[in-house]
Amino acid sequence: MIALRGVSKTVLSGSAPLTILHPLTLEVPDGQCLAIIGPSGSGKSTLLGLIAGLDSPSSGEILIDGVDITKLDEDRLARLRGEKIGFVFQFFHLVPSLTAIENIQVPMEIAGRKDAVVRAQALLDEVGLHDRGHHYPSQLSGGEQQRVAIARALANNPPLILADEPTGNLDSTNGRHILDLLLQVRHTRNVTLVLVTHDLNVAAVADARLVLRDGRSVAEDRIAEPVAAR
Amino acid sequence: MMFVTRMIAREMRSSWRRLLFFFICIAVGVGAIVALRSVIQSVRQTFAGEARSLITADAIITSNQVIKPELAAAIDRRLAEAGATSIRSVEIATMVRGAGAAEGRTRMVELRAVEPGFPFYGRMTLAGGQPFTHDLLKNGGVLVRPELQAQLGVQVGDTLAIGERQFEIRGIIESEPGRRLGAFSLGPRVFVSLEDFEQTGLLTFGSRASHQRLVKAPDETLDALVASLRGDFLNQFARVRSYKATEDDIGENFARAEDYLSLVGLVIVILGGIGVSSVTRVFVQQKIRSIAVLKCVGARSSQLLVIYLAQVIILGLAGSALGVVLAALAIAAIPATLAAAATPGVTIHYGVTVPAVLQGLGIGLLVSVLFALVPLMDVRHVKPSRLLRDESTSARPDLVQVLTIGLVVTGLVLLTVWQAGSWRIGLVVTVGLASTALVLNLAGVLLIRLIRPLARSRWFALRHAVLQLSRPGSQVRIVLLAVGLGSFFIIGVRSLQENLIAQFAVDLSPEAPDMFLLDIQSDQVDAVRAAVMARQDEGAPPPRLIPVLRARVVAVQGGELQLENYEDVRGRGSLAREYTITYRPTLEGNERIVDGAFWTDAAAPAPPETGTAATGGLPTTEVSIEESIRDRFGIKVGDTMRFDVLGRTLDARVTSVRHVEWADSRSGGFMFVFRPGALDQAPHGSIAFFRGPSDPLVRGRLQSELVAVAPNVSVIDGREILQTIKTVVDNVTLAVTVVGSLVVLSGLLILIGAVAMTKFRRIYEAAIFKTLGATRRVIASVLLVEYGLLGALSGAIGSLGAVGLTWGISRFALDIPFTPLPLLTVGGVVVTAVLVAVVGITSSWDVLQRKPLGTLRGE
């Protein structure tokens, strides 16, 4: 379970402090799919980054499976990400110097798993890229790159997948396929899925929705009103 | 661990191209160090431990005069007391003539006449494995070097005439012991027996021979023997030297040479290191996203640091290995002439030495790690949250980074101290490097400030080029430093070379003497003069014969200086050495009086009241001294000097002080010139200067005719000497140019690194310019003007520095007039500008080629 208690983020904009996320309390039960929606600059990605321990909040606690990750040092956070969190980004963020299969192997190697190669191939099969393993990211289409990114996110069987606009850089057909894949994975593996999106169609398939504007939560679990009111 | 090792392999697979410059920077520097150290170590290995062979004995006694019987008896007594034995040897530069088919061909050689038993140490090797025994020399045998064989076209069994005797060639010398490293040679070596040599008539009065006693003594008595002999020779024209002194000298000289040259190599490595630093910084910048991704999937900073550091180590080692290969190739390509010029008659097997290789690998690795460490530390600051939004890494260095910089600086200082072989020199070099960097940096800042007003130019390309150069964070100063330093080396040495060659170029003035004759006896003067005049070109001035004698100062009675006897004179250092003196009625063209008055009525004898009571058979006279004698020893006009001229004492009053233009030595230069009269009747020889025939064939014929009429006379052909000097200067120039080119190469690598560092920004800016309507041509002209300006500024720093260097060395070290070389200076600036422009534009090719839309979309 993910629990946020009074989590906020303030940064310096020039010399003046700027709050990009106002205190927020939130719970995401295990196995739930939460969609975070809102316009650009509303604090969606900041929130996702805080949940992942990629950044530290200015105040509040973030608990993942009961562990307050704001108290962890960089190395422990890295280990936590490796074991418990899988990421999918809008711009895929594969390591360009590694082939598709190597990109998938990396998290398992970091975790010290001996079966990294075999498992990476199985994951490739699962995302439908059976014969593309030895291609470099630059040799793959956007949709294929995102499939590799999903396979990489699943590498260590994490209970939590965080996806930052996973369909935002894809055409509608590919976007649909990727969304289907993510939902399928969520069901088959029973993982918690938190996704940031602009796309109301994407948000519609989630169990719960959080709408942010100017760093504040303006609505929870009620998709139509706040977004339509824009 | 599996992750780290696999990632190292994967990263190497993809990054090696990007890190190629890293690799080359290290290879160039390490190559320079390994090559320089190996050459010196090869030479040293050849000579080290062979100090005895170098002097062919345990100790050597040398004198420029025949050792007098009473002194010889004293030496024999000392040797007997010490249980030592000795043999005699004479070395002399003389002429040989071919006989038979080679009749009429002559050549100056360095003859060595030896007694049976030579050499005590070392081995004489002859061609074809022929063993050396004294029997080969007995009864008119001669051994010659292959050069002489080629020059005269003679074979074993042919006859050579030396002086008044004929010799049969009985072998070809491959190598001989006792040949000094780097000694200036007047000709190839020949060996004869001393017994035969005494019949050649070459040992005439005043001939320039070195008379030697080679001593073999038990080790336990050697030091005492040398000390006692030195005591005996206190007042004689003889020196004694033990092999131990030679050994120490060789060791020290080579160690010093090796350390100094290695420092030159180190400068190249450090410049390479700057390149490494730029390349690593760019590399880390390009890798930031990958690093963020890896952190995102659980990698720790320490693991990533290990991955990138391991790559640096692997590349450093590989680059160093390439450097070793480059060094081996460079050494294999050492010009044979250089090897021969440095070590006449000695075969040195140049090769890469193991200690040099180990040092090179160590330095390559250290410099790679030290210079890459600071930029690599940025890996720690890459936040995985970069993947979610664009944010810059912290610019302020933290404690770890400050400590790393401290570690790197300390490491570099220690590295320099290690390479210099001394704390003092290492620190001096470090301070020197830092100061040079500071001066060049200041020059860079100044030049940038000077061109800044051009940013207001209405020409788009110039305005933006200047803005690029003067913007904060540009790599301009480091490029100016490195390229400027390299061009400074190259232009500096070229300009020195031209100044030097100009000094020696006798060809410049068609009437200047270019042939010299030594050791002409009084009874040979007329015949020599006639032989020369018969062959000279029409209109050439007749030969000038200058009488010469050998003398030394044995006492001085002066206002400031009171030296009662020769012991006192010895206390004044070089005043006690043997001087070549002359007498004449007038000043030469290269002389002027700076104090006192030169005798004008030379025909009249010196006024009797001018000197103290004559002590020998010669009357008191007057002497004119060179100004350095006055300056160094405080001898003034009016002082009286006592000279020993071949065993006879002569008092002379100093009546004038002369300034001699040594650079213009065609009229000769003498420290002491005597008033004619007192020495006219003393037995003496002459030297002659004249303009030789311009036709080389006639020159050759004249040489053989001269040797025929005066076999003992040495003929020195100025043109050949000039050629030798040119070769030596050319080789030195080549060596320094190679070093300078390496520095320029390092500078260009730094430039490429600098271009790469700013390339992403450039591409982005170019995309915006293109969107706003700038054509590729406009972008290209901005780049051209920018790098052209950068190159011109580097060239200006190098050229101005070179002018300063040449002026300083000409004026203070070589004492030759400084000739400005505007063509070279301007040429240096232009070539550097073009080079930098070409390299800059080539490495910015992407900036011109990229389509703007892709760049602006962030693809």
Image: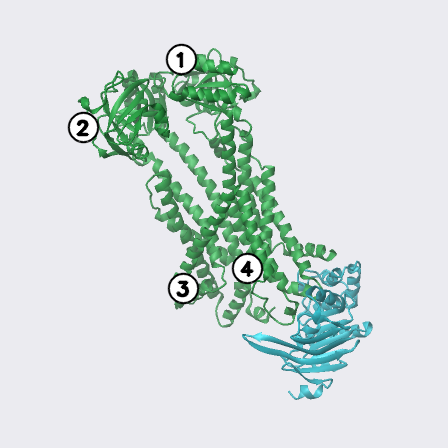
> Is the C-beta separation of discs 4 and 2 under 8 Å?
no
Type of amino acid at the residue the image marks with label 1: Glu
Marks 4/3 in contact by CB < 8 Å: the verdict is no
Q: What residue is shown with label 2?
A: B600
Position of residue B844 relative to residue B105, above or below, is below
Q: Which mark is residue B452?
A: 3
Q: Secondary structure at mark 3?
A: helix
Chain bearing tag 2 is B
Label 4 and label 2: CA atoms lie apart by 76 Å
**Depth-wise, is mark 1 or mark 3 nearer the camera?**
1
- Check disc 3: other Cα within 10 Å, few if <14, some if 14-19, many if 20+: some
- Measure how far apart labels 2 and 3 are at the Cα level: 66 Å
Q: Amino acid at mark 2?
A: Thr
For the residues bearing labels 1 and 3, Cβ distance under 8 angstroms:
no
Q: Earlier in the sequence, mark 4 or mark 2?
A: 2
Could you say where residue A169 lies in the image, as x and y percent from the top left? 66, 73
Q: Does residue B377 appear left or right of residue B528 in this picture? A: right
Chain B painted colour:
green
Residue at mark 4 to residue at mark 3: CA–CA distance: 24 Å
Are dots 4 and 3 on a single chain?
yes
Indicate the chain coloured cyan by its letter.
Answer: A
Residue B598 image-quadrant placement: top left
In the depicted structure, whether residue B211 falls above or below residue B855: above
